[in-house]
Each structure stands twice: as structure tokens, then as C-alpha cells.
Image: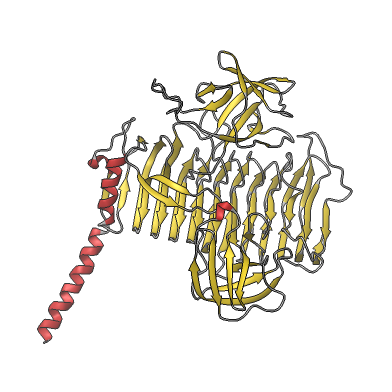
Amino acid sequence: MIMRTKIMLIGALLFVWSASCLGSKTVNILDYGASSGGSDCVQALQKALEECRHYPGSTLFFPKGDYHFYPDYGKDKYVFVSNNDEGLKRVIFLLEDFRELTIEGDGSQFVFHGFVNPFIVEHSSNILLRNFSVDCSRSFHSESIILANHARGIDIEIPENYPYRINNGVLLFTDGQREEQRKTTVSKVSVYPYGSLLEYDPVKKETAYMVHDYYLDGNPLPADSLGGRRVRIYLDGLTGTPGNVMTFAPSHRNYPGFILTDSRNIKFEEVTIYHSGGMGIVGQRTDNVSVLRCRVTPSEGRLVSCTADATHFSNCTGKIELGNNLFENQKDDATNIHGIYVQIVAVEAPDIVVTELKHSQQFGFDFLKEGKEIEIVGGKSLITKSRNKVLEAERINKSLTRIKLTEPLPVGTGMGDAIAEIRAYPEIHIYGNTIRRNRARGMLLNCRGKTVVENNYFHNPGAAILFEGDASFWFEQGGVSDCVIRNNIFDNCLYGVWGEAVIDVAAGIHEEREKSRYNKNIRITDNTFRTFDKGLLLHAYGVDGLVWKNNKIERTTDYSPVRTYESPFKISDSDHINIQE
């Protein structure tokens, strides 16, 4: 018996030792048929990833070079992505059910061709993505040089790296591949649809002063060829400054760079995102995400990097760390950290309700599970009405879920109110980042965990920091409870139209604003505000507890002044506000 026990113990130790040895394997992508320089590396990648799957703790190593990935052999997966567009995705790096994996790029460039999603990480843990760049051979947006204004639009010149054609009198952007000649009305050319226009200053490499988006009706613009690559486009009210750049944003957010779903311990180090057809990094229902010493920046010859947020996190937990990164020229915010609301659309019994994900870019976001604690808030006031617990949950379809509660709804609660999960809200640490030249705001802080924003540089056309949350449009749960903003530089923000103040504490409170106190305990200290006019530095309502102290204000002449407020502070419907100028 003693000998048998010894043998079993030795066997167990050998198993642990062998697993440890297996975990240290380095898988070189070149050994699986990949090569640098232009050939398709997808099949080699898939073989290498399968090898890594068998050896937890592996490193997939790309010797420094240019690696190209085409859609032909990518994996298909139907994906719901928070704040982006759902759909059947053609995925290149599909990391499902991986444990302990490092992808080491050694400074390599990863170039993705066509309509593909570069990375999806799902049900995986302890993933390190390090030292490589991501770009697209043809960007999902397009750019043009403004030549002149005319009575019904503008004349533009389109650079060669944005292929286009005028088909049946409308402007289409394409992939530049030659169309097969055939007798059919159906075109095989790949079209890059656009949904809005925005003007940029090519000298400052930022959105032009005080411009706004021109949103389209879903159809391409009427256009005439003027010879060469010059085009006249027609849109009533469209104007621009000759010499500036007019950009065409994609109609949808179909191709985020990195999608993280139901995973934990995901780290990015020294990763550069030159472009993505949606957000750069999206984390949903994921625990512990770090983005360190990374860059979101456009490649040479472009003014736009990501076509939406640089980073975005929905219903995440643990810790979110954004440290020493560069976020520039993305078409939306550097980050947005929030939860999700669903709306009560039917009350079938005192303890049974049907809920709906109202915004189309939230469809398929599952979080109402058995045993989950929830809060129920007024749909128009965001005031918490009650707390409850999910006893049973039945997903009806991608937008509707029926839930049975442990307690009946209180009187006065019902259709039109909203439900969010009460979860272990993540701790947020955002430090040492440069956030500049993008469209819209710097960051949206909508998390109830402890949040520290320090030692960052902001230069944004809208609010540098926005506190939001609503149950009427995006249905994003917000409401900070402990937020520190210190030792940051806010450099000439608000040179555009996306915000009321440099720091804007707001929310979608449409009723009972005098009672609602959605954001709490905000401390703004020891920051420097460089400002070119008498605009608002702080706008706030619905707040309980805010301190403004030891902040320095410097006047500049870098932009033409446009605002003339008597005070840099505009505060209403709030309690316990301490402004020390």
C-alpha cells in the first residue's frame, strides 16, 4: 500500500513537471509555413495556434517582419459586440478557450486585407499580446482634399490610396480590385460604404476648428467626375475650407481590432493599432484588462486611426488599467467604461418582466442570468427604485429576455424603467496617456468602481472627460461613486462641438433632475487647464459630492475665442459642491 502510494505520488509529480515543461514551449510562426513579405499567413497561423492550444503557457513568436492576412481561410463566427455592429465575422486570430498564451510580435507589422476582424478573444484567460502593429491594407474610411465649394456641395480630389468609382451618378469607394466583365446588373467590386463626412485640418492633423459631422441618409452621395481624380459631390449645406481634408466615415462599426468577450487577465503591451473598422479594443464581460505602452495612431498618409473609440469596456470587472499609451486621431473617444441597461417593455406578473436591449449596437449582450443581482431605475430620472435578484432568465431573441424575480416589483415600477446588473464594478486606473486630435471627447467615465485619472495629457475638440449614462438612447449604465482626477494637463480642449465643458458631469436625466444624484464623490485637483476662450471648465448637474481644488488656469491664443461665459463653472441640481478657485 505504501509503495502504491509512492508510485501514485511520483506519477502526480511527473504530470505536474511535464505540464510545466510543456507550458514553456515557444512556437515559431515560420515553422508552420508563414513568411514575411506579402503571402497569406492565415493557414500557418491556424496550425500554430492549434499547437499552442496543446501547450498552455506557450508563446507564439513572430520574428520581426511584415505578415499579411487575407480573408480566404479565416474562420466565420457570428458575433455580438457592445457598441459595435453584430454580424457574421471573418476572423483571423480566433482565440477561443485559450489558457496562458503570449503572442510576441518582435516589432512585426500585421497587415489585414479585406473585410476581416483581426482578433477575437473569447472564454480565454491569461493572454498577453505584445510588440506588434495592426493595420489594414485598405482603410475602412476614405479621405479627400477639398478643392472648392459650389452651390450644392464641394469639389474634392481623392488620393490614390482611396480607390473609388462613380457608378450611376453616385460616389462609391472600393478596394481597387478590377471588376470582372460580365453581363449583369450585380457588381462584384467590394464597396466601402460611408455614412458621414467630417473635415480635418491637415496641418494640425486634427478635426478642423468648430466643424460638425454631416450625416447621410444611408445612400451614397450624388457625384460627377471633373477629370483626373477630381470629383464634385452634392449635399445641401455641405461646405469646407479648400486645402483641408474631408473624411468619409464607414456606415457601420463592423470590424473592431480586438474583441474581448467573457475572458479574464488580458494584457496588451506595446501594441500599435494603425487602423480598425470600428473600435480598437472592445472588452465585454471581461475581468482584468491592461493596455500598457500602446499606440492608436494613423499610419503614414492618413488622418484617421480607428473609426470609433480607441478602447471601450462594457460590464467588465476586476481592474482596467490604461497606462502610458498614445490615443490619437480615432473617430471617437479614447475610452468609455460603462454598464448596460435594458428597458422593461412588459410586466407579465408582479415578479415577471420582459426586458429589451433597445439600442441595436447592444443586441445580443447577455447579462441577465440566474442569480444576478440587479438594480431597477427610473427610465427618465435614473433614480434607483429598488434592488432585486434574477430567479430565472429566458432569452427570447437577441433583444428580448424574460426574467422572473425573487421579489415582486414595487409599486410605481414598470414599463419604461430600466434594469442593470449590480456587479463587482472594476477599479479604473488611467495614467500617463496622451489623448489628442480625435473626434469628440477624451474619455467617458461611467464606472462605479474606484476611478483614478492622473498624469494624462488631453487635447480634444470636445469635453476631455465626460460623465454620462442614460436609459433613453445608448442605454449605458454610469454613475461614478469615487473618482479622482489629478495632475492632468487639459490643453486647449473644446475647439469643436462635442461637449459643454472641459469636464462635463452630465447624464440622461430627463425628469426629477432636482432629486436625481447620479454621480457622486468626484475630486478634481492639481490639474492645469490651458484655454483659448472663456468657455466652461466644469459643467455639472445631478451630482452629490464634488471638490475642485488647486487647479491652474492658463490663457492661450492658439484658437479664435468663441465662448464668453462669466464664470468657468456651471453647476445645478447638485449637493455638497466645493469649488476652491
- How many tags in the picture? 0
Question: Can you give x and y, in whole percent of width and height, for residue 315 in the image?
Answer: 54, 62
Q: Residue furthest bottom?
A: 1
Q: Is residue 133 left or right of residue 144?
A: left
The residue drawn where x is 82% and y is 58% is: 571
Q: Quadrant of the N terminus?
A: bottom left
Question: Can you give x and y, in whole percent of width and height, for residue 331 in the image?
Answer: 60, 40
Q: Nearer the viewer, residue 348 or 121?
A: 348
Q: Is residue 511 left or right of residue 230?
A: right
The residue drawn where x is 59% and y is 55% is: 430
Question: Can you give x and y, in whole percent of width and height, for residue 423 in the image?
Answer: 55, 70
Residue 202 seen in this snapshot: no
Q: Quadrant of the C terminus?
A: bottom right
What colour-coding does the image apply?
A: secondary structure
Relative to 157, residue 44 above or below: below
Location of residue 168 by image quarter: top right
Residue 130 seen in this snapshot: yes
Q: Residue furthest top?
A: 227
Q: Residue furthest right?
A: 566
Question: Can you give x and y, in whole percent of width and height, for residue 77 in the image?
Answer: 39, 50
